[in-house]
Image (tube, grey):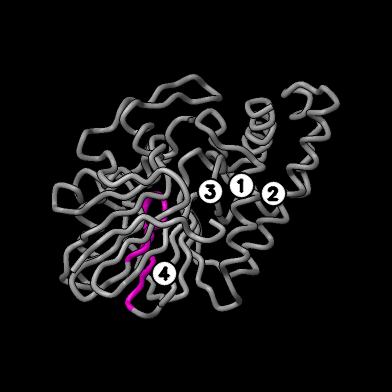
């Protein structure tokens, strides 16, 4: 039997990252890697955001769906885990590398759960804060069918419970985190990644919200929690603490320059995160040192 109850849980665009991440990808060569997290819970990695799968007695809860062209490969990977259907898809945020497969799974019977701002942004389309490029509205079948407004909700399938919580104005304005207490697995979406994160300040994101999100996760997690980040390898509470500390350092350094009246170009020229780049910057894409610095700066300007 499946059911959803709404509850206030305790404590609880830039161009769509999916479009940017999909450029030049040969999806025919992408393989889906599955990691067993214990108690019939799994992390799936492919091309795009990480996914989490929890198997109940009569169905599956799935967190995020990556890119649309990978649906068949993702479904095949899930079928190796269990023959049961995916009954619920929970989206951590609206970006296409996390929601691209929504429509296909919905057509196969899955209910799509998300914070309501995800529904709004997928339905309306979004604009890149740095370039002005526009992402069109998503197909109707990709739009969340069971949105929640505030606090969070619980999703139960066949004895498995996913506790879903909302963090405000972090990676976007519609971020959800998902905790499976019986497996001690926490899925964070892009509010926690293993490199510099993208901060989608044009669609509600901000550095302060990112820091608050990690502080919430640090209270939920313990030393044995398996943390599925939005991107990158499986993580621990130690990794999460390091990420939090990096965010605080970056926020304080860029905020000081912002408060001094420095322009975006002046801040970039000052290169205030040079020492952090060695550990956290990616070589290209949305996680470069320059892009992260711009996003931190603009999150102040956008929320000021």
Q: Are marks 2 and 3 in contact (CB under 8 Å)?
A: no
Q: Which residue is mark 4?
A: 180
Label 2 sits on a secondary structure element that is helix
Label 1 sits on a secondary structure element that is helix
133 displayed left or right of 300: left
Task: Kindly report which numbered mark, 2 or 4, lies closer to the viewer in this rendering.
Answer: 4
Q: From what the image shows, is residue 157 above or below residue 104?
A: below
- The Cα–Cα distance between marks 1 and 3, rounded to whole angstroms, is 8 Å
Magenta residues, as a range? 40-53
Q: Residue at x 65, y 49 (%)?
A: 211
Quadrant that contains the N terminus: bottom left
Label 4 sits on a secondary structure element that is strand
Quadrant that contains the C terminus: top right
Point out residue 134 in the picture as x, y percentages from the top left corner.
40, 22
- Closer to the chain start, of discs 2 and 1, is 1
Can residue 178 be seen by looking at this rendering? yes
- The Cα–Cα distance between marks 4 and 3, rounded to whole angstroms, is 17 Å
- The Cα–Cα distance between marks 2 and 4, rounded to whole angstroms, is 26 Å
Report how many numbered discs are placed on residues in the image. 4
Task: Kindly report which numbered mark, 1 or 3, lies closer to the viewer in this rendering.
Answer: 3
The quadrant where residue 256 appears: top right
Q: Which residue is mark 2?
A: 247
- Closer to the chain start, of discs 1 and 3, is 3
**Which class describes the residues within 10 Å of circle 2: few (<14), some (14-19), or many (20+)?**
many
- Residue 29 part of the magenta segment: no
Task: Kindly report which numbered mark, 2 or 1, lies closer to the viewer in this rendering.
Answer: 1
- The Cα–Cα distance between marks 4 and 1, rounded to whole angstroms, is 21 Å
Near-viewer residue (68 or 103): 103
Point out residue 152 in the picture as x, y percentages from the top left corner.
43, 53
Q: Are marks 2 and 1 in contact (CB under 8 Å)?
A: yes
């Amino acid at each position: 039997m499946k059911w959803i109850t709404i509850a206030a849980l305790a404590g609880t665009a830039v161009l769509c990252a999916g479009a940017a991440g999909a450029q030049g990808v040969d999806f025919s060569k992408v393989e889906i890697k599955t990691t067993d997290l214990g108690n019939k819970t799994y992390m799936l990695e492919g091309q795009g955001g990480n996914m989490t799968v929890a198997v109940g007695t009569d169905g599956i809860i799935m967190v995020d769906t990556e890119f649309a062209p990978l649906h068949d490969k993702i479904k095949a990977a899930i079928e190796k885990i269990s023959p049961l259907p995916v009954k619920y898809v929970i989206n951590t945020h609206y970006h296409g590398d996390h929601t691209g497969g929504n429509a296909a799974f919905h057509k196969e019977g899955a209910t799509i759960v998300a914070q309501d701002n995800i529904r709004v942004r997928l339905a309306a389309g979004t604009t890149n804060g740095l370039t002005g490029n526009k992402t069109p509205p998503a197909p109707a079948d990709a739009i969340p069918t069971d949105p929640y407004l505030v606090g969070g909700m619980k999703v139960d399938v066949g004895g498995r419970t996913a506790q879903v919580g909302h963090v405000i104005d972090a990676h976007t304005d519609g971020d959800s985190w998902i905790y499976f207490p019986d497996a001690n697995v926490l899925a964070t979406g892009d509010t926690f990644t293993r490199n510099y994160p993208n901060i989608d300040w044009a669609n509600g994101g901000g550095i302060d919200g990112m820091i608050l999100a990690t502080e919430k996760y640090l209270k939920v997690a313990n030393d044995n929690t398996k943390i599925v980040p939005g991107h990158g390898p499986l993580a621990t509470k130690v990794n999460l603490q390091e990420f939090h500390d990096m965010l605080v350092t970056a926020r304080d350094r860029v905020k000081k320059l912002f408060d001094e009246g420095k322009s975006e170009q002046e801040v970039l020229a000052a290169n205030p995160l040079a020492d952090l780049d060695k550990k956290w910057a990616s070589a290209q894409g949305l996680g470069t040192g320059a892009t992260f610095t711009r996003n931190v700066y603009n999150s102040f300007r956008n929320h000021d």
